């Protein structure tokens, strides 16, 4: 029975399944490391085109968040937390780049920051923080002072809280 289940599955998939069964966290970390390595190679192959396009986006937007997924549908807990943090401090509009749509996107930000784990936030064209940096700056209140805005906060009974909706 078991042999029949593995027929047709590539050897790499069978090896990953065996490793994941033994130590799922280690197997997942290894899988992500492989993704990052392939992404950096893809970026290096297309560095002139990808770099020029993304450098232009960094220059034309105050804040750019390279994340896994989109703000409405983040694909990792770290990316979801980054969006929550930026929402909580009422950060001005930011451009979100889904690094999972093309390997060169993740490769670009990893090569630029030397940090393997997304999300990465750029402010005024320069790397500002990764997830851990955003969390630390959020906890100390530095993030709200640096990129937050009071213009969109609620007033009255719910003063200082996030608005429920703006129509």
Image: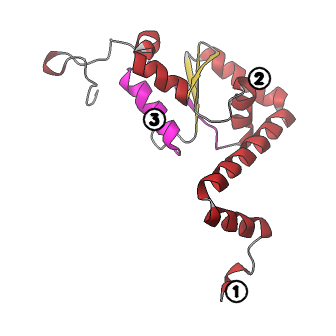
Res. 118 image quadrant:
top right
| 3 and 2 marks in contact (CB < 8 Å) | no
Badge 3 marks a residue whose secondary structure is helix
Label 1 to label 2: alpha-carbon separation: 49 Å
Q: Which residue is found at the position 69% from the left and 29% from the top?
A: 109
Q: Position of residue 47 (x, y in %)?
A: 82, 29
Residue at far bottom of view: 1
Label 1 to label 3: alpha-carbon separation: 42 Å
Quarter holding the C terminus is: top left
* Residue that label 3 marks: 81
Q: Which mark is residue 20?
A: none
**Segment tinted magenta in the rendering:** 74-101
* Residue that label 2 marks: 52
- Give the foreground label among 3 and 2: 3
Front residue (pair 128, 1):
1
Local crowd size for mark 1, using a 10 Å CA cut-off: few (<14), some (14–19), many (≥20): few
Q: Which mark is residue 4?
A: 1
Local crowd size for mark 3, using a 10 Å CA cut-off: few (<14), some (14–19), many (≥20): some
- Compare marks 1 and 3 and give the one earlier in the sequence: 1
- Give the foreground label among 1 and 2: 1
Badge 2 marks a residue whose secondary structure is helix
Label 3 to label 2: alpha-carbon separation: 29 Å
Residue at far left of view: 157
Residue at far right of view: 45
């Amino acid at each position: 029975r078991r042999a029949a289940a593995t027929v047709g599955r590539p050897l790499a998939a069978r090896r990953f399944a065996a490793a994941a069964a033994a130590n799922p966290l280690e197997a997942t970390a290894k899988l992500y490391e492989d993704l990052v390595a392939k992404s950096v190679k893809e970026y290096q192959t297309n560095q002139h085109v990808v770099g020029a396009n993304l450098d232009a986006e960094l220059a034309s937007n105050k804040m750019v968040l390279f994340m896994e997924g989109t703000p409405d549908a983040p694909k990792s807990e770290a990316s979801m937390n980054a969006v929550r943090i930026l929402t909580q401090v009422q950060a001005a509009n930011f451009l979100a780049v889904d690094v999972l749509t093309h390997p060169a996107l993740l490769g670009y930000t990893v090569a630029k920051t030397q940090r393997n784990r997304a999300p990465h936030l750029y402010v005024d064209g320069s790397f500002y923080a990764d997830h851990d940096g955003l969390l630390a700056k959020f906890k100390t209140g530095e993030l709200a002072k640096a990129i937050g805005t009071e213009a969109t906060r609620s007033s009255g009974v719910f003063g200082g809280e996030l608005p429920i909706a703006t129509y």
